[in-house]
Image (spheres, rainbow, N blue to C red):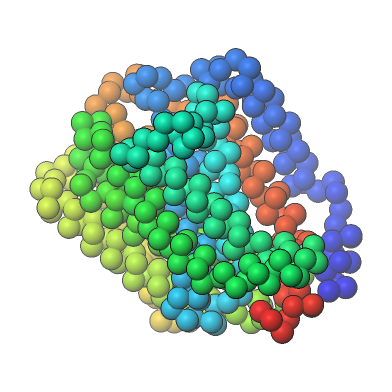
Amino acid sequence: MTDRIAALKSRPLLTPFNIFAAIILVIGAFLTFKRFTQGIGAVSNLTDTHPWGIWIGFDLLTGVALAAGGYVTSAAVHIFGKKEYHSAIRPAILTGFLGYSLVVFALLYDVGRPWKLPYPFLVSQGVTSVMFEVGACVMLYLTVLFLEFSPAALEWLGLSKIRKTVVRLTMLLTILGVILSTLHQSSLGALFLLAPSKLHPLWYSPYLPIFFFVSSIAAGLSMVIFESTMAHKKFEIYMDDRHKQEYNPVAFGFGRAAALVLAAYFACKVFGIALDNNWRFLFTGWGAWFLFELSGFVLLPCFMYSIGVRDRNPKVIRAASVITVLGIMLNRLNVSVIAFNYHVPADERYFPSIMEIGITLFIITIGILVYRFIVTRMPVLYKHPDYEDVH
């Protein structure tokens, strides 16, 4: 504990990362002011033809998928009894909580009148809308994630009685988290069932909800491995012995599961093409791009995970996690941006403005800084000394 406090106090303020982050925050604050004073058209290339851009494709769809590590890890430990992965729960829950929080934050930029976000819940309930279901599930799951992570914050604040009450709800919160995640992860894919004439047939399928849900599991498993790798490199001084000892076992266990899920996802995609009879599209330019996504970001990491687990090689597993995370990003962007409105002439197609990209970097930077603040102060990567016997 003393070493962690000393490390926190000795950290220099003017580091290259801090300077770079400060520049992004200043630029992002300016772009935010411009967005909310001059309108969405002043900072984006969004149009009536393409009203959804990277704020939806990357910030929302990709963010929700990569935040799936929370429910995946909680289910593995609390429901399936994999207690050997217990050290991965709090980092995964924190990543999920921040991911969903930033999704909601990013949505404020994309919605024309963000102050009316509660309107569907308080004034006019559109219960037959897929977007209503997604919004309700995300709101409820964000609450679940807050409660799941709150014991770490309560330990930091010394509120032991409240912490004890919340801990008793662990199993209930885990079950709710899995149910809500199953609903909204799949429903995000169902959103694009409304646009069969706009999304390219290789990415459009009646099975999009299944594709989104299965791939979110692979994303969650891979993100836990990726996040633990980054935390081990940057915050090892804040880790206790259990986190250090379970570093490789978590990679092997989650890598094995990720290999199986990616294999299942690949099979689902092939079955989707067969059932929709879209084989002819594979021999086009779009088909080459689709095969690049499927082979380079599904099959390749699947084999890498398998080889890494077989040979007990954590480096191969961690490399596979990076490729899988990039593949999830590519898939969500293909569905929502790249292969969307594919028939529109090239000069009329959507491409994000530099200001849209700047706001996205601003949001990501905030997430990284908040994550660093929490893990260097709260018992996320280590057990609080006052609660070691009750974890």
The percent coordinates of residue 51 (x first, y second) are 40, 25
In the depicted view, which residue is nearer to us: 151 or 69?
151
Say which quarter of the image contains residue 162: bottom right
Q: Position of residue 312 (x, y in %)?
A: 48, 81
Instruction: Residue 23 in the image: state x and y as whole percent.
Output: 74, 35
Q: Residue at x 72, y 41 (%)?
A: 21
Residue shown at 67% from the left, 23% from the top: 33
78 and 332: which is toward the camera: 78
Answer with left or right where residue 183 lies relative to residue 223.
left
Question: Can you say whether 244 is above or below 138 in the image?
Answer: below
* Residue drawn at x 79%, y 78% as measured from the top left: 385
Taking 334 as reference, is 51 above or below it? above
Q: Classify residue 246 as left or right of residue 305.
A: right
Q: Is residue 170 above or below residue 21?
A: below
Choose between 388 and 311: the one closer to the eye.
388
Task: Judge from the rendering whether residue 43 lies leftward or rightward of residue 75; answer left or right.
Answer: right
Q: What quarter of the picture does the N terminus occupy?
A: bottom right
Kindly give the residue lying farthest to the front in the view shown: 123
7 shown above or below 373: below
Q: Quadrant of the C terminus?
A: bottom right
Q: Image point 34% across, 64% down: which residue? A: 262
- Find residue 5 and report its horizontal and vertical position in percent: 86, 66
